[in-house]
């Protein structure tokens, strides 16, 4: 192996180690910020849990605030990756005035299913959900990007669908009320209290399908769709 090849291999190894350290800090920060909140978290807590050192935070994120913003961006990216495919289909359907009502309702159910799968996904840790909840309560400025992502990938597409289905503008109060009522059904199932009330320790495929069936029926009732969209 020549000297240039050895230098390249060394640089590649260092890059991979650096990416691993950055990823580990973000994953650790989700847990620690969820447990202690932003103000209660110190950089020492973070590096001790991540088994690294203080200069690593400075190198990759600048400071604690930078790491917090990186966590928010990481979660927003995850949400966008899961929701954007169906959101794109919704936008194309809504832009076409000839899209049949049944197709619009079917897309709304697809959005609802995707949201339910997102919020109940076991790979999306409980710490991530607590992090979002704490950031909301603490009104962290960086949390705004999560609102923007959810609005762009979930809220706005669903309001456009609901507006078409009830014959009102997407930004009408009635449209927003019905959209929130529909989406809130799915979000309720990421709540630990809901699962405890049902006696569930986990949500498998069969239970997920049962939830979807009920949510579809409720959504049809909310919007006056007699056949439940045929799903």
Image (cartoon, rainbow, N blue to C red):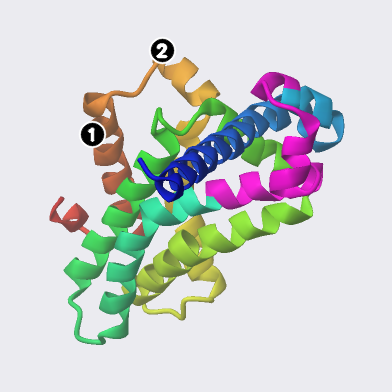
Q: In which quarter of the image is residue 214?
A: top left
Relative to 55, is 205 above or below?
above
61 is within the stretch colored magenta: yes
Q: In which quarter of the image is residue 35?
A: top right
Q: Is residue 43 left or right of residue 186?
A: right
Q: Nearer the viewer, residue 120 or 16?
A: 16
Q: Position of residue 205 (x, y in %)?
A: 23, 28
Q: Position of residue 77 (x, y in %)?
A: 49, 53
Q: Which of 60 and 114 is in front in this view?
A: 60
Element type at marker 2?
loop
Mark 2 residue crowding within 10 angstroms, few (<14) / some (14–19) / many (20+): few
Q: Nearer the viewer, residue 170 or 154?
A: 154
Q: Quadrant of residue 213?
A: top left
Give the farthest residue toward the left: 230
Q: Where is residue 145 in the image (x, y as percent from the top left)?
A: 63, 59
Q: Quadrant of the N terminus?
A: top left
Q: Is the magenta stretch mostly helix, strand or loop?
A: helix
- What residue sits 25% from the left and 69% below the top? 104
Residue at label 1?
A: 209
Q: In this view, does 98 lie to the left or right of 202?
A: left
Element type at marker 1?
helix
- What residue sits 64% from the left and 33% below the top? 25
Question: What residue range appears in magenta?
Answer: 48-75
Mark 1 residue crowding within 10 angstroms, few (<14) / some (14–19) / many (20+): few
The label on residue 49 is none
- What residue sits 45% from the left and 60% below the top? 154
34 is within the stretch colored magenta: no
- What residue sits 33% from the left and 56% below the top? 111
Q: Earlier in the sequence, mark 1 or mark 2?
A: 2
Residue at label 2?
A: 199
């Amino acid at each position: 192996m020549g000297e240039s090849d050895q230098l390249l291999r060394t640089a590649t190894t260092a890059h991979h180690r650096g990416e691993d350290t950055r990823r580990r800090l973000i994953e650790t920060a989700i847990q620690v910020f969820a447990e202690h909140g932003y103000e209660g978290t110190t950089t020492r807590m973070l590096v001790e849990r991540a088994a690294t050192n203080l200069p690593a935070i400075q190198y990759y994120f600048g400071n604690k605030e930078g790491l917090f913003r990186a966590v928010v961006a990481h979660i927003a990216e995850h949400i966008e990756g899961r929701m954007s495919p169906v959101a794109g289909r919704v936008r194309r359907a809504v832009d076409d005035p000839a899209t049949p009502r049944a197709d619009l309702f079917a897309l709304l159910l697809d959005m609802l299913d995707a949201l339910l799968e997102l919020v109940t996904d076991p790979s999306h840790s409980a710490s991530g959900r607590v992090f979002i909840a704490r950031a909301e309560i603490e009104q962290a400025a960086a949390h705004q990007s999560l609102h923007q992502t959810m609005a762009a990938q979930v809220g706005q597409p669903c309001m456009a669908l609901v507006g078409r289905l009830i014959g009102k503008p997407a930004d009408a109060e009635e449209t927003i009320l019905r959209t929130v009522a529909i989406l809130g059904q799915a979000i309720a199932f990421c709540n630990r209290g809901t699962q405890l009330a049902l006696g569930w320790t986990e949500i498998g495929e069969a239970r997920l399908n049962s939830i979807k069936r009920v949510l579809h029926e409720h959504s049809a009732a909310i919007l006056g769709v007699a056949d439940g969209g045929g799903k």
